[in-house]
Image (tube, grey):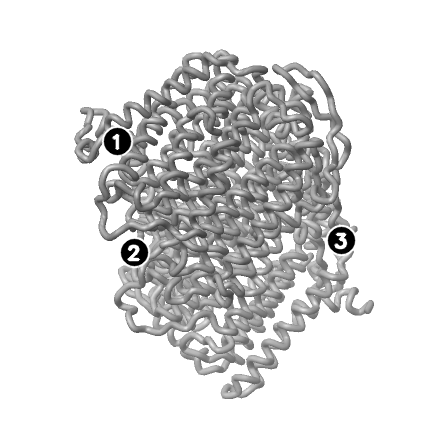
Amino acid sequence: MSWFDNGWGLSLVVFLPALGAMVLLGIPKAQETAQKWTAMLFTGVAMVMSIIIAATFEYGSAEQFQFGTKLSWIPAIGSNYNVGVDGISLPLLVLSTVITVLAIIYSWNNWEEPHNPKAFLALMLILATGMNGTFVALDLVLFFIFFELVLLPMYFMIGIWGDKSERTLPVFNKVVENRLYASLKFFLFTLFGSAFMLLGFLGLYFRSGEVGAPSNTFDIPTLIALGSENAFGSGTFAFLVFGAMFLGFAVKVPMWPFHTWLPDAHTAAPTVGSVLLAAIMLKLGSYAFIRISIPILPDMAKQWAPAIGILAVIGIIYGSLACLAQTDIKRLIAFSSVGHMGFVMLGIATMTDIGINAAIIGMVAHGIITGLLFFLAGSMSHRYHTREIARLGGNQKLMPWLGGVLAFTAMASLGLPGLAGFWGEFMALLASFSPLDGLDLTLFRTLMVLGAIGTVLTAGYMLWLLQRVNLGEPKPEWDGREFHDIDMFEWMAWAPLIIATVAIGVFPNIVFGATRDAVVNLVQNAFGG
Amino acid sequence: MVNTIALAQTVLAVVEEDGAVVEAVELASGGFFAQWAGIMLLSPFVAFIAIILVGKRMKYNGAELAVGAMALNLVWSSVLFVSNMIDGIFYEVGFVVADVGQFMGRPLVFELGFVVDGLSIMMYWVVAFVSTMVFIYAVSYMQGDVRVPWFFASLSLFAGAMLVLVGAPNLIQLIIGWEGVGLASYLLIGHYWEQKENSSAAIKAFLVNKVADVGLIIGAIMIGRTLGDFRFSSIAKAAIAQDEALAGIAVAAGLLLFFGAMGKSAQFPLHVWLPDAMAGPTPVSALMHAATMVTAGIYLMGRLFPLYQNLAQDAREWMVPIAAITLFAMGLLALVTDDIKKVLAYSTVSQLGYMMVAIAVGGYTAALFHLFTHAFFKALLFLGAGSVIHSVHSNNMSDMGGLRKYMPTTYRTFVIGALSLAGIIPLAGFWSKDEILGVMGVEGYTSFMWLAIAGAFITALYMTRTVALTFHGTYKGEGVPHESPRLMTIPLVVLAVPATIAGLFNIPGVSWGSIGNFTSWIGARIVPMGDYHPSSINWGLATAGVAAAALGIALGWSLFGRDARTQQLRDTFEIPFLYPLLRNKYYIDDLYMRGLVNPIKGTVAKGIDFVNGSVIDGIVNGAAFLMGAFGRFVYQGFDQRGIDLAINATAGGTSRLGGALRFLQTGKVQHYAGAFVVGAVVLVVGFVIFT
């Protein structure tokens, strides 16, 4: 299957969903079953192909980009259609294709107002192309396009199918619907970061020719090769380029204090939107740090590392404390993401192979667990028609299975050892104990202790959430109401995530088997260790 | 991908006397039962899953699966126990589950597996024996409960997690089992989660342990980072070899790990969760206090004993006082408590103090021997209390009294347990407590030793009070009490046997032929422990211990046991200052709640939320507002159709956005797709022009 190995396989994984979106447009609006099966077919095939890629991936040389191709695209600026996967992007690519399929299964009979599956599915498929593409793009222009491509579908998902309740904007002194405020905030915030990111990319491009590339280039492998010789140096130029890219990526992660779009977007988004946002889109930023910032500008990464570490740990503590104050279940889960992504960024900030491995498994685990949490929150608000924690209670009694899965997922989210969430947190702390040579030991060990204290706070808000939502007696307002427990579509969407949580928790080599060599190679090239 | 590291090499174990090596013997590999011990360890998890899936449809609601798994464990570990008596066993196996990058120039691997040696075999057996008794008892005790299958599933999880912890060949697996035990205890303490105080007690247990786990995790990281691997056998070997790098961090890491143990083993001031944990059904309390939870911290200290003995001796300065405070101050609380289970809970905290003080002063064998005997008589006492509660439907001793007539079996076995706990010769508790006192004296902690003897007096006093208020005098409750069914009394009788005779296995200087004694059983470790073993009974110390206990019994009986009148008066026995102090548990709970938990949950969290909503978002919204105003200013008078939708909308044009949305809602996504293509083209053209 040489056609498959030489770029077609990977390109199909990326573009099949978009192709599916176009096919969807041709299906009459009334034929919803046809629409659903079309979406299912295209994303399903993409998922199967990504699994074939994972199965035939050469793990012995995980540091090399495989299944790739490089075609001339925009010769005027030396930009190519260059794609490929290595051990770092592979787990994230598979996560992305699988979550997309699960999201479609979940939505099967569960459309939020104003319904219109056709439009919703089309947006979801375009989103899938953007997410998959970001993980395989090896050209900065291509990367930028995919990175931005995810914005619009998500913007419309939130804006159209989002939360219709209203809020008063303090500065504008205007009453707007939450979905409008959140979608706009999400869009502008990310666009703001992206503008800087693009500046950073252009900086790299224009400098690359001067520092050793045959001509100015957007080619990521070439830039990485330059980076391993530290061709961009550690002067003001590199500092500014790194800073510009940092802004772009940090907004996406999101890192404190650029995170405030996230609780609003998550809370207002429809269930599937929240799931995709949390499970995949948050990973684009942290992935970009690993793929672009560190290997291309290693010296700068080292200089910025303390700042990244400090912001990461602020995120952990701040996110956990903010969770304790939340009254809305989705908003609480959203804030928990700030804390969890803090651990991911702390791992990256150590600039060690262990830390970066911690970050990747942390990303995968957060994708699975928080994705599941948002599914659950969605199903609960679908049944109770409220997300207000104070009105819930005794959920375990009303819906034993749903309550059980919620309890399981909360345990996974608080980092219970033996489940997937543990390894990312533990190894981030482990890496902080001994960061890259030359980084401030005292600082990083302080960060380690603060991060460890953060795990206590995490356990605190998660258990408190369970107590208020799951335990106790149901509130009188639900008397005599019949609730249906988890239905078949929900089981189909959730079971794979539950199984993955346990499997990765017991046998984390599922992820490390892919990432290890690639990460070791990355760190050695960047820092010579 | 999986690669096995079997370490069944022959290892020298060392027979010691008075700390001196007298003989080195080769440890056996243990054969089939050691090499396949994983089956035993995993069986409770199989039961856990099976009960969840099919428990409801079974005759005893899945209890048969839970009991079956534990019976398998009991048989299996008994074989190991006996083999280890004859030939010391050491077998260790680890499967690599994670292979992550470079770590000090070596690959960092995480392994799961199990270790079979003297210490773990003893624990396997205690866990299996106590669990089997408790599970059988629970079949009857929990009849008619709201969720019996779930209860037995959780019990299985509890025992399974403890076995994973005990079997851990390295710190990572220990942490997994450790928090697994925490999870199971959370589920069981909160078994009646319809009432808020129960779920709060569950959360308290989990969180206090989580606080302690910070120490455990950082300590583990320090040791793993220094040695380059997390295996207990590596730590022990490095400690014996006086490894310089390890020596450098031994005290700090040792104290951090001790902090972790303080949580699970309820040492002052992290003991607060244990009395509240009585919210769970009584079988849970029995299990938790005897075998599966609070012993974990002592076990960890025992596992790491070579580290403390050889490199981290300075850590004793902290460990000994903390443990001594625990054993004395917590015993006092048992004197003023009305809830029979809480009396026993404080008693456990106090006895854990004994174990911890023993291991802290260097008494490896003494501490674990007390853990061993305590498991029997404390399980017995809790199950006895459960039998009483089952009969009178109240936890409060003020609702009991005179039960010896109605519940003779429970009464007799409870008294045996109480006497054993009080340390009356020749019951099990006497021998183990005596050994602790002996080690404290020899290691030069004389003043703490006298405190421990005073603690023995307190122990006898509160146990006499408990027996008197519960079983003597006149019955004060409602209805007619009755003896419990045989499924409950048989475990009591079975447990009473080791509670009586277990001490005989470690009489100083006595070795039982080819099976040796307790000291040699748990001495089968990869390196010598080097702790003190008395060669004969110290009669002076034994007399002091028994005298203290006898005095406690006498005083207790004269205060509470003589007749109904003095019983009624017991709560007027109020010493000023001391009584309120004890009734309020030294105000430690209040301190934590008012000083820490409530401010964080309240003020701090709300403050952060305010910062988020008003400060950071204020800046964001303010910036958007300014941008919008700026945009309006610049584009005033222009046709705005081509302008960025975003700025438009920010400038207040929400209606325009609404229009755009309605446009989309018509289903004409073609327009959107078209717009998207146009956007992409614009982008590309932009790039071309840009160059």
Which element type, helix, strand or loop, lies under badge 2?
loop
Q: What residue type is labelled 3?
A: Tyr
Query: Which residue matches tag 3?
Result: A59
Which residue occupies 74% across, 25% down? B25
Is A525 placed left or right of A462 in the picture? right
Q: Please rate how many residues cluster around mark 2, counting C-alpha atoms within 10 Å: few if below 14, some from 14 to 19, many from 20.
A: some
Compared with residue B135, is residue A2 higher up or lower down, i.e. above or below? below
Q: Do the residues marked 2 and 1 share a common chain?
A: no
Residue B576, x across and y down, in percent = 18, 24
Query: Which residue matches tag 1?
Result: B561
Residue A289, x across and y down, in percent = 60, 48
C-alpha distance separating marks 2 and 1: 74 Å
Which residue is at the front of the view, A390 or B85?
B85
Which residue is at the front of the view, B624 or B170?
B170
Query: Which residue matches tag 2?
Result: A171
User: How many labels sit on residues?
Assistant: 3
Disc 1 chain ID: B
Q: Do the residues labelled 1 and 3 touch (CB within 8 Å)?
A: no
Residue A130, x across and y down, in percent = 59, 65
Q: Which of marks 2 and 1 is in front?
A: 1
Which residue is at the front of the view, B115 or B503?
B503
Q: Quadrant of residue B681?
A: bottom right
Residue A42 seen from this side = yes
Which residue occupies 70% across, 25% down? B13
Residue A93 marker: none
Is B147 placed left or right of B77 in the picture? left
Q: Which residue lies furthest to the right in this view?
A: A2
Residue A230, x across and y down, in percent = 69, 39
Q: Which quadrant, please, contains the C terminus of chain B?
A: bottom right
